[in-house]
Amino acid sequence: MCGVWRLAVAALVLAAAGCGDAVAVSGKVTLDGVPVESGTVTFVPEDTSKGQGAGATITNGEYKIEGVGPPPGSYRVEIKSQKKTGKKVVAGSPAPPGTMVDETVEAIPAKYNAKSELKAVLKSGANPLDFELKGRK
């Protein structure tokens, strides 16, 4: 019986510790003033010893991370969105040979994803965070 109580107390302590560090992030993403129709926002921790990052899907220019979000801290932010080129290309595996699909390219400049210069400091609680990106010009 003592073991059950210890487990219950340990579970309560862990739950209480986690409650203060709940992070929610939401906002809008625009490129040259136009909402990004679809894509992803990823928060990559600058100190990987403090946990993993988190990501969200962009839908009609908005994203939201709730519930089990990233822990508080400093992050590099990566934003990606694919756009169709109007060309067809041969699909890769596991599609049947000869299957054609729409070709897509990254619509967001590299300085916001692969070579991201975006930074964010997330704190416990709600973090409204909009990203107003500028195009390739």
Image: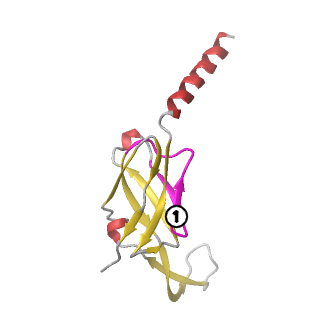
Image spot of residue 65 (x, y percent): 53, 52
**In this view of the protein, which residue sits in the foreground, 112 or 22?**
22
Residue 1 highlighted magenta (yes or no): no
Image spot of residue 100 (x, y percent): 59, 85
Q: Amino acid at mark 1?
A: Glu
Q: How crowded is the residue under tag 1: few (<14 C-alpha within 10 Å), some, or many (20+)?
A: many
Image spot of residue 52 (x, y percent): 45, 46
Q: Which residue is at a point 38% across and 57% down the rendered structure image?
A: 77
* Residue 116 as seen in the image, left or right of residue 52: left
Q: Residue furthest right?
A: 1
- First to last magenta residue range: 53-73
User: How many numbered markers are drawn?
Assistant: 1
Q: Is residue 66 above or below residue 79?
A: above
Q: Residue furthest bottom?
A: 87
> Is the image coloured rainbow, by chain, by secondary structure, or in one colour?
secondary structure
Q: Which residue is at a point 64% across and 15% down the rendered structure image?
A: 5
* Residue 62 as seen in the image, left or right of residue 134: right
Q: In what quadrant of the picture does the C terminus appear? A: bottom left
Q: In what quadrant of the picture does the N terminus appear? A: top right
Q: Is residue 124 above or below residue 42?
A: above
Residue 61 highlighted magenta (yes or no): yes
Image spot of residue 116 (x, y percent): 33, 63
Name the residue beneath numbered marker 1.
Answer: 62
Q: Which residue is at a point 36% across and 66% down the rendered structure image?
A: 112
Q: Residue furthest top?
A: 2
Q: Is residue 73 above or below residue 110?
A: above
**In this view of the protein, which residue sits in the foreground, 97 or 109?**
109
Mark 1 lies on a secondary structure that is strand
Q: Which residue is at a point 50% across and 29% down the rendered structure image?
A: 17
